[in-house]
Amino acid sequence: MTSTVEWKGDEFVKSVIIPAAHDGLADAARRVQTTMSNLLNGPSPSLPGSPPGNDTGALVNSIVHTKPRNLRVSIGTNLPYGLTLEKGATIMARGKFLTIPLSDKAKRLRRQNVSLRNVKSPKLSFIRTPSGAYLVRNVGGASKRTEFWFKLVQSVTIAPRPWAAPALKAAKPALQAAFSKGMEKGIARRAGAAL
């Protein structure tokens, strides 16, 4: 009695290996996404060189991954400041000044995304001091004090606060394990279905 074994390598790769690799890649992408999100949950503001802290949650909530395609997957954010935080940047004023919030009230006002020229309440005034230009609010009453809300500058340099590259490095062992496990399960499932 003789038996014949026919090897169809290209067919096996197309029907078993590539789909299994997609399974492993999808699981690996989820793990990297989780690692990125976890790195961004520290206090804000963060120190230069350390991952950015979680101020509004916008960056951490924007991290997604694509479905595997052609054995590739993308993981990250579509928010432009994600790259600015990762690599650092110098930002120049488009008009006369950039407005840097100096208080929690100013940060809340800035998050409303309104032009400071259109702000009626609180009424902000421009002053120039030896240390720079500011938008301030004069508080009435007995104290007659001045609240400094925004510093006005021509440019600001943001030091790098890497988060994507460190997350990928930290996730590498889990990424390799997820990909291997996905491959094993995918090959077993697809090879069984092919029999």
Image: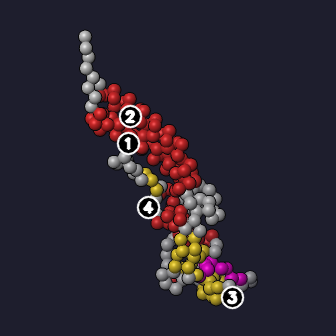
Kind of residue at disc 4: Asn
| Residue contact at pointers 1 and 2, CB within 8 angstroms | yes
Q: Is residue 8 left or right of residue 62?
A: left
The disc at residue 130 is 3
Residue 121 placed where, x, y %? 56, 79
Q: Quadrant of the N terminus?
A: top left
The residue under label 4 is 78
| Residue contact at pointers 1 and 3, CB within 8 angstroms | no
Q: Earlier in the sequence, mark 4 or mark 2?
A: 4
- The local crowd at label 1, few if under 14, some if 14 to 19, many if 20 or more residues have their Cα within 10 Å, is many
Q: Which of marks 3 and 2 is nearer the N terminus?
A: 3
Residue 81 placed where, x, y %? 50, 66
Which residue is located at x 64 percent, y 85 percent?
A: 132
Is residue 175 one of those drawn in magenta? no
Kind of residue at disc 3: Pro
Find the distance from the CA under tag 1 to the CA under tag 4. 23 Å
Secondary structure at numbered mark 3: loop
The residue under label 2 is 186
Q: Which of marks 4 and 3 is nearer the N terminus?
A: 4
Secondary structure at numbered mark 2: helix
Find the distance from the CA under tag 4 to the CA under tag 3. 40 Å
Residue 28 placed where, x, y %? 46, 44
Q: In which quarter of the image is the C terminus?
A: top left
